[in-house]
Amino acid sequence: MRVPIVRLAVWVLPVLLTGFAGACSGRPPPVALPPQDLDAAIRLAERDSRIARATQLTFTWRAREPDFRHDGLGVARVEPDRARLDLFLDNGEVAAIAALVGDELRVPEALPLELVPPPALLWAAFGVFRPGNGAQVLDGGRAGGGLEVRLRLPGGDSVRYRLREHGVAEAALLDGGAVVERVRVSAPGEGSAYPSEATYRNLREYRELKLRLESFEHVEPFPPYIWDPGR
């Protein structure tokens, strides 16, 4: 049985290098936690931010890149360990499709990957703290009333998370300590488990992608075939 649709605020994903520089200045370092306390806090954050049930989200989007400027409509379908994002142009043509199955990102070969964040950051855009199986904790502690933690992913990348109660505030992909890609999300809106706003920035490739989330509704579990968009 479906529940009534709930209106959400803006879900925004822009790329602005100057915004990154200003945001990183003057932030005090986190207060270190003992390893056992840090591990417990990480496990709690993973549990509390996990998607509880199948949900469909709808939004409008606009992309700005050096050679790509378009807008249209989008749909996100999410379950506890799976998510799918579909972006359509105003004429109905598909602009991008991506599915997350656990830590695996699945994208059709014929469609571009540039609009889609890497798995850990795409999960963060939904407010989910999911660094992936095999992630290694490097350091972390309390910062700004929340938790800041840095992890090394199985593929070798380092990601820094800033967490608030029940979700992600920021996830940043690092290269030698410098942020190269980042997702920022605001706290969920009233009555919602999802961020009212999120911002994805690719600082190396100067991309801007903005999405305005219009609504969400809880639904029955999705058919299995949607999680393999390459077929």
Image (cartoon, rainbow, N blue to C red):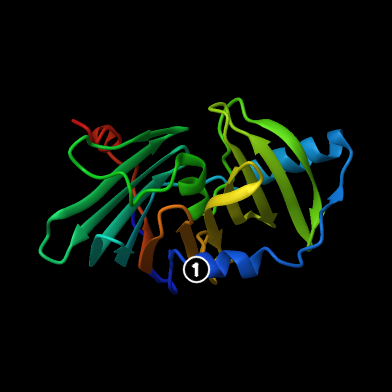
Determine whether 186 is above or below 96 in the image. Answer: below
Mark 1 Cα-neighbour bin, 10 Å: few <14, some 14–19, many ≥20: many
Q: State the residue lying farthest toward the right.
A: 34
Query: Measured from the top left, where is residue 43 in percent x and y?
Result: 70, 38
Q: In the figure, residue 207 lies in which quadrant?
A: bottom left
**Residue type beneath disc 1:** Ser
Residue 29 visible, this angle: yes
Specify the quadrant that holds the C terminus.
Answer: top left
Residue designated by label 1:
196
Q: For the residue labelled by badge 1, is the local secondary structure a helix, a strand or a loop? A: loop
Residue beneath the point at 46% across and 58% down: 200
Foreground residue among 219 and 135: 135
Query: Measured from the top left, where is residue 94 in percent x and y?
Result: 17, 52
Residue beneath the point at 67% across and 37% down: 151
Query: Measured from the top left, where is residue 24 in percent x and y?
Result: 67, 63
Residue beneath the point at 79% across and 58% down: 143
